[in-house]
Image: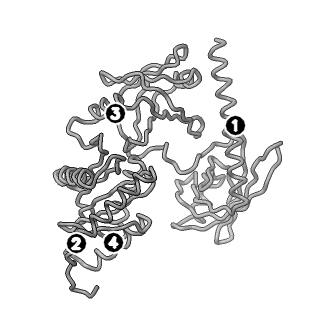
Amino acid sequence: MKKGDGQTPFYEALNRGIIKSHIGFVKRNGVSLAVLCLSLDVPNGDEERFEKGVAVLQDLTDFSALLLCERGRLITFLKDLHLHRAVQVAKNIEERLLKESGVGVKYGALTIVDEGESYDTLVGRLERYMEQAEKFGEGKICYGTAKYDFCTKGGEDEIFANFFSDQKTVTLYNFYNGMPLSEDVTVLGYGEKLLRLKTSLAKAAFLKNEPFTFLKHPLLPDTIKADIVSAMPNRAEVVLTNLRFIDKSPVDRENIRVLPDEEIEITIECADGTELYGTIHSLAVNSLAVKLKNPEEAKRSLAGSETHVMLDFDLKEQQQKMVHLRVSAVLFSFDGEQAVFSIYPNHFFKQKIEGYIALQQSRLITIMQKMVLNFYQG
């Protein structure tokens, strides 16, 4: 299209056709699909900046279809995402758009295509959320499903009451030495801001000494954090209160992070030729935290961002065998005594790290089983 050409008379039909095709795809294949509508804030109507923003948006949505609608609003699609994950992606898009292109989000709407959806119900819901978000302003993105409006005026308690009256199972999360422990539990009831759940005996015994827990469900937009009122191992029940959505959830970490049960020495080879020494504090497939032995020397060698290093360390395998790893890494953060690195292991080293994490998981599960046994033996 030449610069200055107007939109063809068919652009509205084009948008309808694309949206209807996505609805049909969801119904035929039973996949999860989120629809995101944004009203952008382009400083001074800068066409080049808008173009750059569109490029960033396309990259962040894996080059999904992008529709231009009335009032300059954009609609795009987030594939294979349930609502809670789609909300996180939308928030990331909002931050990255502003950071990388200078284009802000005035307000937006996000929803999931329902199995019984029609074009009119989907677009009507998006328009309703856009109206709500416009009233809030300041980058607000309102979201929900065909059944739950998470921007409702009734507040979170109304959402929880409606949700737990319909949904009879939810996933409960806690952490032990950095390892997430999850279990699908049964909802016994919700009322007076108290949630009663049926758990396993082991989970109830573990929660007896925990102050809070996390809950997730594909239809929830964010992780719920809740305080534990009581845990009753003999009845395999737990009672929760003070339920609230949290934006930053430890449950959503891309990879499981474990704390070694023994001291693991590590050598950091810096670009200036310096060798630093320390011990591994925690380890995941894509990151590693090191407690440094000489913080002052590390401060000189790790100054600046995007510091590339090589990491050398040994990990335990089955039958107490040891394997040596040499991994490329980039400094992620440094607080003076501890350095966190993003690591880039090759396929072989990645398998070894995954194997070590699996060993640590098995060890922690054994410890938990002993804890439960000790509880019942008094």
Of marks 3 and 4, the one in the foreground: 3
Left or right of 70, for residue 36 = right
Report the coloring of the rendering. Answer: one colour
Do tag 4 and tag 2 residues touch (Cβ < 8 Å)?
Answer: no
Identify the residue position indicated by label 2 in the image. Answer: 43
Mark 1 burial class by Cα count in 10 Å: few <14, some 14-19, many 20+: few
Q: What element carries label 2?
A: helix
Residue 163 shows which numbered tag?
3
CA gap, disc 3 to disc 4? 36 Å
Of marks 2 and 1, the one in the foreground: 1
- Quadrant (top left/top right/bottom left/bottom right) for the N terminus: bottom left
Q: Which of marks 2 and 3 is nearer the N terminus?
A: 2
User: Which residue lies at the image location 23% right of the left edge and 74% below the top edge?
Assistant: 10
- Quadrant (top left/top right/bottom left/bottom right) for the C terminus: top right
Q: What residue type is labelled 1?
A: Ser
Residue 54 shows which numbered tag?
4
**Tag count:** 4
Q: Is mark 3 on a helix, strand or loop?
A: helix
Q: Is mark 1 on a helix, strand or loop?
A: helix
Q: What residue type is labelled 4?
A: Val
Of marks 4 and 1, the one in the foreground: 4
Q: What element carries label 4?
A: helix
Mark 2 burial class by Cα count in 10 Å: few <14, some 14-19, many 20+: few
Do tag 2 and tag 3 residues touch (Cβ < 8 Å)?
Answer: no
Residue 115, how many percent across, how many down? 36, 47
Residue 167, how many percent across, how many down? 39, 32
Identify the residue position indicated by label 1 in the image. Answer: 362
Specify the quadrant of the image occupied by residue 76: bottom left
| Residue toward you, 55 or 250 | 55
Q: Earlier in the sequence, mark 2 or mark 1?
A: 2
Do tag 3 and tag 4 residues touch (Cβ < 8 Å)?
Answer: no
Left or right of 123, for residue 282 = right
